[in-house]
Image (cartoon, helix red, strand yellow):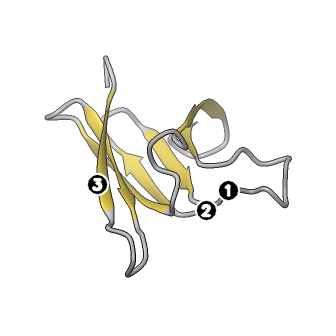
Amino acid sequence: MGDLCYDPVSDYLWVIDSNSNKDKPQYLPYTLYLFNGDGSKLLNTYYIGDFANWNPEAVCVDHKNGCIWIGDDCDSGNPSWLHKVEFSNL
């Protein structure tokens, strides 16, 4: 797991998995998970490996801009990225 963000406005818990999980195929690689507020029910999953495939480690809900921000932490040879993922009805 990389990070989680509780959204009190929607009462959702966003959890990001920063691993490729090639050694654990039962877990989805590079995935953003959406849970209900207490984390007891998985509501949805979003694959983010198409754009955040180095080491996505941070997630932040931004209602004002209708998006989720995902921080991709890279190493000294590669730049880090901040990805904006837009959602309708966030």
Between 6 and 55, which is closer to the camera in this rendering?
A: 55
- Image quarter where the N terminus lies is bottom right
Q: Nearer the viewer, mark 2 or mark 1?
A: 1
Q: Which residue ends up furthest to the left in the rendered image?
A: 64
Q: Residue at x 44, y 43 (%)?
A: 51
Where residue 20 sits, quadrant-wise, is bottom right
Q: Secondary structure at mark 1?
A: loop
**Which residue is the site of mark 1?**
20
Give how far across and how far down residue 88 sits, in percent: 31, 18
Vertical relation: 90 (above or below) 16:
above
Question: How many numbered discs sit on the rendered protein?
Answer: 3
Vertical relation: 30 (above or below) 89:
below
Q: At label 2, which amino acid type do we have?
A: Met
Q: At label 3, which amino acid type do we have?
A: Leu
Q: At label 1, which amino acid type do we have?
A: Ser
Q: Residue at x 42, y 70 (%)?
A: 74
Q: Which residue ends up furthest to the top in the rendered image?
A: 89
Residue 1, numbered circle: 2
Give how far across and how far down residue 46 sits, in percent: 55, 33
Vertical relation: 15 (above or below) 44:
below
